[in-house]
Image: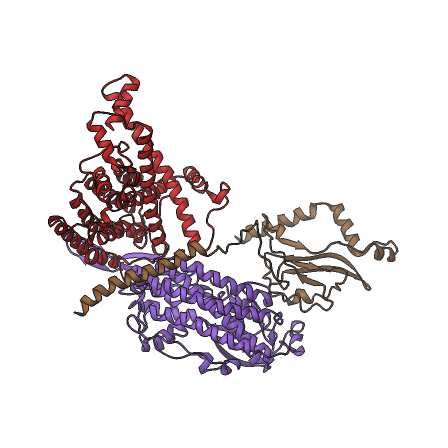
Amino acid sequence: MEALEMYTVDDRDDVYTEELKLNLGPQHPSTHGVLRVELAMDGEIITRSRADIGYLHRCAEKIGENVSYLQFNPYTDRMDYLASMNNNLAWSLTVEKLMGTEVPERAQWLRMICAEMNRIASHLIAFGTYGIDIGANTPFFYAFRERESIMTLLERPSGTRMLYNYIQPGGLRRDVDDTWVADVLAFCDDFEKRWAEYNTVLSHNRIFIGRTANIGVIPKDMALDYGLTGPVLRGSGVKWDLRRDVPYLKPYDEVDFDIPVGEGTHGSLGDCWDRYWVRMREMMESIRIIRQGCAALPGGEVMTKKQKSMYKTPIKPEKQNVYMRCENPRGELGFFVAAEGGTSPVRVHARAPSFCNLSVLDALLPGTMLGDAVAVIGSLDIVLGEVDR
Amino acid sequence: MGSIRDYFGNITSALGTTAKGMSVTLRHFTSEPPITVMYPHETKPVPPTYRGMHILEQEKCIDCHLCAKACPVDCIEIEAEHHGRKLEWEKFSIDYKKCIFCEFCIPPCPVDCIHMTSEYEMATDSNDDMVEDLLTWTGLRPEDQAALDGKPTAVQAKKQQESKKGGADKAAQIAAIKARLKKGS
Amino acid sequence: MNALVAFLSDLTGLEGVLPLSMAYAVCIGSLLGFITVYAMFAIWMERKVAAHMQVRYGPMETGGWHGWAQSVADALKLLFKEDIFPSQANKFLFAIAPAVVFCGVFAGFIVIPFAAGIQIASLNLGVFFLISIAAVEVIGVIMAGWASNSKYSLFGAVREAAQVVSYELPSATALIGPILIVGSFQLGDFNTYQANHGWLILHNPFMPVAALCFFISSLAGCKRAPFDLPEAESELVSGFHTEYSGMRFSFFFLEEYASMFVASVLMATLFFGGTTLPFNIGDIGNWATYAERAAAGEPSVISGIGDFLRTHLGIVVLLLKTFFFIFIQMWLRWTLPRLRVDQVMALGYKYLLPWGLVTVIGTACFEAFGWGWLPH
């Protein structure tokens, strides 16, 4: 793709004005990773923009053609590294669909709890870093205090604080220890108080509202045209959530939770504040889900003996094409796998939510100011590991 | 009229929300204890399931290579010579530059001899130090050596040969690689 | 100052230019020393305040007790850093920009009323001089932004020019109220008036509004959050001082903390009593005593243990009040997000300036009709 050309703004006899070419990134504190956005600016106003990606490309999809189905699980961890459990879940469900296996009930419920905890952790980062983008440096640390609790809790069954590789095709790597459920419930109680604090310090702050309301408005049709998913889509008023509409995990049907959508509270429907507020409310909905999950957690094993044999003998699905999608914190993560009977797939494609959500950036930025560009990019909540894979 | 209400509304909401936000930060300043763990003076305890550096129970290992095959990044290198049931160990190394700590090497082991410890402080200052050999002893065990009636095994013979030739082989290899690179560039 | 010159000429037995220049050297040296030590302390304080508001510790290692030597270590590090010039930069402007920025603020320190005899120049136009000399830094910032040959720096410099220059208006307007009441620009007179009549913030209901307007405008003038657009870290990396490193960068830093000090001292002196305590307890820091002695022809700076204590306790009182306002400035920085440039302009012109003028008119009425709440 070619770089942006700078247009002439004013060409009178004594004054020649050209647009200013500014590179936002790839090394920039607020592009959420190595993202480069080329901006053509007329003073403070952005006239055109072009997002340039690929700085974090690690050939994950190509690697998928060379490793086995189980071995690809840690690679999915590293795509959206902030929502590892959810990525693992999507890939595990894809492989289970390929093999036609059933997962024990306890594993399904624990999967839901872990996925929702990771959703909270991911939204906490979105909240904290959005504060930093807008200029408030303190809520980030509060968010990380809660995230630390989550990571410590998830460290106990899986063994690490991030990139868990815990949800594996067939079930879970191991069962949780005896006090884990009680500790998770204690965390939920603590979190509700902190959530109120976040709103006092950032969400309802007049300056924050002034910086995010009526900025980066995505109308409903534009959201649907660009194929946006996740909180970005729900912020524009579309009530679409795969957990409810295309259920991929049985326990989601048995718990009670709302799908928050944007309501244009402080400005137009679908502005940055709406998307941000959808994420905040989703955190509380996740708490609800976790509480119900912990209460209804059945006993039993988390991986059948037959599934455990896959650690020693790689699985060989039959020749088929499969697409499986899940609701990640950032949107719809889908895995397309073309299998042809070998131990590795012939083609793996990850439909990354951040990649599709980023496509709307070039339509949103023109007409805004530089400070707003940062606010818009932050509200899309992209992770470059996913965008570039 | 609406704009006047907006004007004063802006002032009150700005002052009000600022004051509320300031009260939260002040409360944190005065009464919330810092949550920092002062590493390296203090460390945060890790659970027993932690995925740190590996440890090998060498006596149990049967050289089946299931852990090496399970590794997604092929970071385990195992070399051992079989003499019937006895193993002459050369190498069992894990390249920690490659290891992603995914724990896939642990479940396949049929004798449960490889484990992940809670050791995470692995910083070194050279690439070579990042390749850890997990063996506690190489070669045959003394009792096994005796059972082989004092004859050197093939591995031991090769080692003796190499030490006689010295570094000439290695130097020749390096020269060949350099020549190939020059030709290619 | 005159007392110091007389003291030095007595000491050395010389007359004319020599004791005068020695006096200048002593003043400038002590002022530089004070600013440097203060800035180091303020930077440490900022890091600690920020840390505890963010549930962490801040500096803890350097120097042992809560990392008190961190600023000293940072200053040493900056001194040893390589002096980097962007290759296409305008070398002359790039080099003198930090100096211009610092000198603007440094010049304002000569009128800071620490105590009756401890004020380098008791100008008749104290407040006016202070407000206007601080505007010199705008030139330095624009020089820095332009000479850096970087688009990000240019952005920061242009925003800064607009912001600081615009906020001088409400800043000065808000200060007219106290000036009207006291009837003089001289900073020492504010101390005297407030010692005799009570703190100016209680004079009439417009004074708190004026104090708030001045405080917010001074935040913008110091480029502190929520007005830290010129150095908006998350947008412009570092704004107009992106390309600076080492000692040149530390000049900008010193300037920021020095102007915070000046703004806080003005708040303390003009609205909150300056060197005096409420109800003039113990006659601490009361400049009137000095005025009497000066009128009686005694040139010495301080005489007698009682006066010595009173004067120096007055300095302590002033510094306590100043650091209280500096703490509030830091508190605001770590709580509030940043305003966008058009919002900054709107706030300055549509909110602060009109309310500043309202306080001027209100205070004028209260003065004219003698409705002030303070005893006369």
Query: What is the number of callouts on the image?
Result: 0
A302 and A308: which one is in front? A302
Image vertical order of residue C114 relative to residue A86, above or below: above
A366 and C158: which one is in front? C158
The hue used for chain B is brown
- Classify residue A45 by image quadrant: bottom left
The hue used for chain C is red
Q: Where's residue A389, x and y in %?
A: 48, 66
The residue at 62%/59% (across/down) is B52
* Left or right: residue A303 compared with residue A86: right
Question: Can you name the residue that lies furthest to the left here?
Answer: C368
Q: Where's residue A159, x and y in %?
A: 60, 64
The residue at 77%/53% (across/down) is B158
The residue at 56%/68% (across/down) is A183
B165 and A155: which one is in front? A155
Question: Can you name the residue that lies furthest to the top here?
Answer: C13
Residue C84 visible in the snapshot: no
* Left or right: residue A67 compared with residue A190: right
Image vertical order of residue C270 relative to residue C228, above or below: above
Please name the colour scheme applied to the rendered image: by chain
* Left or right: residue B81 compared with residue C98: right
Q: Where's residue B68, x and y in %?
A: 66, 64
The hue used for chain A is purple
Q: Where's residue C175, x and y in %?
A: 20, 47
Give the quarter of the figure containing the N terminus of chain A: bottom left
Residue C115 visible in the snapshot: yes
* Left or right: residue C284 compared with residue B119: left
- Classify residue C252 by image quadrant: top left
